[in-house]
Image: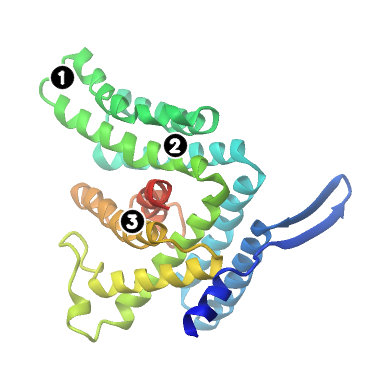
């Protein structure tokens, strides 16, 4: 009986209408994206009331940033694949600048990553099979060191450039390949981040839940992983799309993505990748989960 009730909820038609005429602008939709929009608005409004009532400055700053992020991500995806490619390229360019500063890449290697930050999303838009060339691109990241004869630092430069080409540029290109489900995946990843934080805090009274997943980040605990799995399941149910592959991608990919960025920041001996994004630090601090969730969601979901 309970399973039947759950399946009815899961398979509800989530298409909703949106019709308005404003001068030359005419919008007439009956789509799932309208449902996503209203879910986002409702959650931001409810969270805003709670956050403002708490009067905690850090939470207010984070909520304000979320209010800005939602349309910046949602509108380009809503418009189409081309604007989604532009969004992916813009995110990748900013992330590359932060990453290059963290690992101390030189100008030539940084320029190579910036080129890939634009080329990968463009390829995903115009001819997706080109993304299969990623292993060749990884090997090509050695060329600047080879041609300059960099014996002393060539291995390090190549390793960091190759890793960045996959971790940032190739991964964000999957916003385009996932296009019709890109906002769903982004929303689920963001909600799962919050659920992981709640799980870590709410289960901290249990010894097993306090165990860190890695020495890289004591705050990433088994309790947080449990919260991520539960949260991912609930939010994907709300959005009407649950598969084992997508659940694994959002829950485990998100937690592992946080740990990968923690590794990079630990090596750089910094707390945040940047300081310009209120409440979060830098862009890498905000999208670190997505950098693994997106390709995993494409491959598994």
Q: Which residue is drawn at 77% across and 60% down?
A: 18
Q: Can residue 282 be seen in this view?
A: no
Q: Which residue is drawn at 16% across and 14% down?
A: 149
Q: What element carries label 3?
A: helix
Distance between the alpha carbons at the discs numbered 1 and 3: 35 Å
Residue 87 spot, x, y in % from top left: 54, 41
Q: Dot 2 corresponds to which residue?
A: 93
In primary-sequence order, the first of circles 1 and 3 is 1
Q: Residue at x 36, y 63 (%)?
A: 251
Residue 268 spot, x, y in % from top left: 22, 47
Residue nearest the viewer, comparing 147 with 174: 174
Distance between the alpha carbons at the discs numbered 2 and 1: 26 Å
Q: What element carries label 2?
A: helix
Residue nearest the viewer, comparing 146 with 208: 208
Distance between the alpha carbons at the discs numbered 2 and 3: 22 Å
Total numbered badges shown on the rendered structure: 3
Q: Do the numbered discs 2 and 1 sit on residues whose CB atoms are within 8 Å? A: no
Residue 147 spot, x, y in % from top left: 22, 13
- The image shows residue 190, relative to residue 175, as above or below, that is below
- The image shows residue 116, relative to residue 62, as above or below, that is above
Location of residue 162 (image quadrant) = top left
Q: Residue at x 15, y 19 (%)?
A: 150
Horizontal side, residue 101 vs residue 78: left or right: left
In primary-sequence order, the first of circles 2 and 1 is 2
Q: Dot 3 corresponds to which residue?
A: 253
Q: What element carries label 1?
A: loop
Q: How is the image coloured?
A: rainbow
Q: Is residue 80 visible?
A: yes
């Amino acid at each position: 009986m309970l399973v039947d009730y759950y399946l009815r909820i899961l398979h509800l038609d989530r298409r909703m209408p949106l019709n308005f005429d404003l001068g030359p602008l005419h919008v007439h939709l009956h789509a799932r994206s309208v449902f996503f929009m209203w879910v986002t608005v409702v959650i931001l409004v409810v969270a805003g009331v709670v956050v403002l009532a708490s009067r905690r400055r850090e939470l207010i700053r984070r909520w304000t940033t979320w209010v800005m992020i939602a349309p910046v991500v949602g509108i380009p995806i809503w418009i189409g694949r081309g604007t989604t490619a532009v969004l992916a390229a813009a995110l990748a360019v900013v992330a590359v600048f932060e990453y290059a500063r963290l690992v101390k890449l030189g100008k030539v290697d940084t320029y190579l990553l910036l080129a890939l930050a634009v080329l990968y999303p463009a390829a995903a838009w115009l001819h997706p099979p080109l993304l299969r060339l990623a292993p060749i691109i990884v090997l090509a990241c050695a060329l600047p060191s080879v041609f300059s004869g960099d014996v002393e630092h060539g291995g390090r430069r190549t390793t960091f450039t190759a890793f960045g080409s996959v971790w940032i540029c190739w991964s964000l290109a999957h916003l385009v390949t996932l296009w019709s489900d890109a906002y769903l995946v982004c929303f689920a990843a963001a909600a799962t981040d919050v659920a992981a934080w709640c799980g870590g805090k709410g289960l901290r009274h249990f010894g097993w839940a306090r165990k860190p997943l890695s020495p890289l980040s004591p705050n990433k605990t088994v309790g947080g992983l449990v919260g991520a799995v539960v949260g991912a399941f609930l939010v994907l149910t709300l959005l009407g799309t649950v598969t084992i592959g997508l659940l694994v991608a959002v829950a485990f990919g998100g937690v592992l993505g946080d740990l990968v960025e923690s590794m990079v920041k630990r090596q750089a001996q910094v707390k945040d990748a940047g300081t310009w994004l209120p409440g979060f630090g830098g862009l890498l601090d905000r999208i670190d989960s997505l950098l693994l969730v997106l390709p995993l969601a494409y491959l598994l979901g």
